[in-house]
Amino acid sequence: MSTFEWTFELRFAVALVLGLLIGLERESASSDRKFQYFAGVRTYTLISLYGFGCAWLHHINVAMALPIGMISVTALAVVGYLAKLKDGRIGSTSEVVALVTFLIGVLTVLADVWVAMSLGIISTILLSEKADLDNFVEKLDKSEFLAVLKFLLVTVIILPVLPNQEYTQFKLNPTRVWQIVIMVSTIGFVGYFLIKKFGSRVGLWLSGLLGGIASSTAVTVATARIAKQTPEKCGDALQASIFAGSVMYLRILVLIWLINPVFVAFIWWKMVLLSIVGMVLVFGIKSKHIHADESQVTPLQNPFEIRPAMMFALFFVGLSAITILTNKFFGDAGLLALSAITGVTDIDPFILSLVQQASSVQHIFVSAIIMAAMSNTIMKGFYFIFISKQLRHEATIRYGIWAILHIPLIIIN
C-alpha cells in the first residue's frame, strides 16, 4: 500500500462515490417526509463532480476556477434556503451539505484521498443518525457536559504552558504530571460513561464490572449500601463488589503500560492472575435474580470534574516526594509499609508515581505495587463487611482468600 498511487482516474471515482453516497442519504431522508429537499441523489453527485472539475481546472492553472465554483454552489444553496423559508420550513442542513459535497469533490484532487473520504463518510453518518443524535441531546446531562467542557478547556489552556522540565530533587515534571492526570481521568470517564449508560439496563454484577473501570472502591461502597438497604440483593451486591475489584488490576495494568511500558513484562501476569482470582471468587455466592432496571451503581463522581483532577494531581505530586524520601531513609521495608498505607485510599496516584519516577524496574517496586493492591483489596472487603452485615461471613472468606494470594506474588521475583 505504501507504493499505491492515487491517479486522477481513481480520485474521480472517489468523488463520484462520495457524492452518490451523500445523495442517497438525502434522497432516502426526503422520502420519509411530506416535502422534498432542494437536492437529491443526482444533484449531490453532480455537485461533488463539479467540485472535482473546479479543482482540476485549478490544478492546470485556470485562474478563479475554485472561487467561482464555490460562489456558484453557495448561490444555489441560498436560493434553495430562501425557497424553503417561503414555504414556512426551517433548517439549513441540506444547503450546508451541498457546500460540504462541493468541498469533498475539491479535496479529492487537492488533498490526500483519506481527507475527502473521511469527510464524506462522517458527513453521511451524521446525516443518517439525526434521530439518535436528537435523542442523545434530549437525554444529555448538562452538568456532566459542562464538567467535560471545563476539564477540556483547562487542559487545552494549562498543558501547553506548563514547563516540560524537572524541578526539585524529586524530579517533578509539571507537563508529565498533568498528562498523567488527563490519562487517568479519561480512563475513569470511560467507566463512568458506561455505568451511566448501561447501569440501569444490566444486572447488578455487570454494573459493578463496568463501574470498576472508574473506581472499584466507590463501587464497593455503593453496592454495600444496596445490600444494606435491600437484603435480598446482598448476594448480587457482593458479586458486583468483587467484580469491580477484579477490574481494578486490569485498569492499573493499562495505566502502567501507558506510563512506563518497561514494567509490564515484570508485572502483567501477576495483575492478570489476581484479576482472574477475583472473578473465580464470585462463583458460589448465593444471589437472587433481580430485574435489570432495579440494579444500578450510581454514586460515581465524574472524573472530568476539575476538583477530582486537581486532587489527583496533588496526591500524585505528594506521593512522589514521599516515596522517594521513604525509599531513601527507610529502604525497602519503608517502601512496602508506605504501599500498605496508601492502599487504604486510592492507590492509583501512588502506583503511577512509583512507576513514573523509576528509571529501571526493581523487584521492590513490583512488590510495592502488589502490596498496595492487597491493602486496597483488604480495605474494600472491610468497607463491604462494615456497611452490609448480611453476608459478613461470605465477604470475609472471599476477600480474605483474595488478600492472602497476594503474599506469594509480593515475594516472588
Image: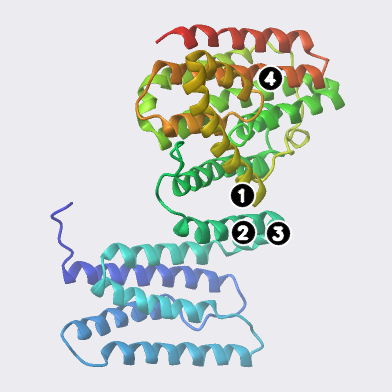
- Kindly report the distance in space between the C-alpha atoms of the residues bearing marks 1 and 4: 26 Å
Q: Horizontal and vertical percent for residue 316?
A: 55, 37
Whether residue 64 is visible: yes
Mark whose residue sits in front, 3 or 2: 2
Identify the secondary structure beneath mark 3.
helix
- Which residue is identified by label 4? 379
Q: Is residue 6 left or right of residue 32?
A: left
- Residue 150 is marked as 2
Q: What residue lies at 58% left-to-right and 13% top-to-bottom?
A: 280
Q: Residue at x 66, y 16 (%)?
A: 378
Measured as percent of width and height from the top left, residue 276 is found at: 52, 17
User: Callout 2 environment at 10 Å: few (<14), some (14 to 19), or many (20+)?
Assistant: some
Q: Residue 410: image x %, image y %?
A: 49, 11
Can residue 303 be seen from the camera position used here? no
Residue 144, located in which quarter of the rendered image?
Answer: bottom right
Q: Earlier in the sequence, mark 3 or mark 2?
A: 3
- Residue designated by label 3: 142
Mark positioned earlier in the residue sequence (2 or 4) = 2
Q: Is residue 248 left or right of residue 124?
A: right
Percent x, y for residue 334? 54, 17
Q: Secondary structure at mark 4?
A: helix
Gap between marks 3 and 1 measured at Cα: 13 Å
Farthest residue to the left: give it. Answer: 3
Decide which of tag 1 and tag 4 comes sooner along the chain: 1
Q: Amino acid at mark 3?
A: Lys
Instruction: Residue under label 1, please give it.
Output: 304
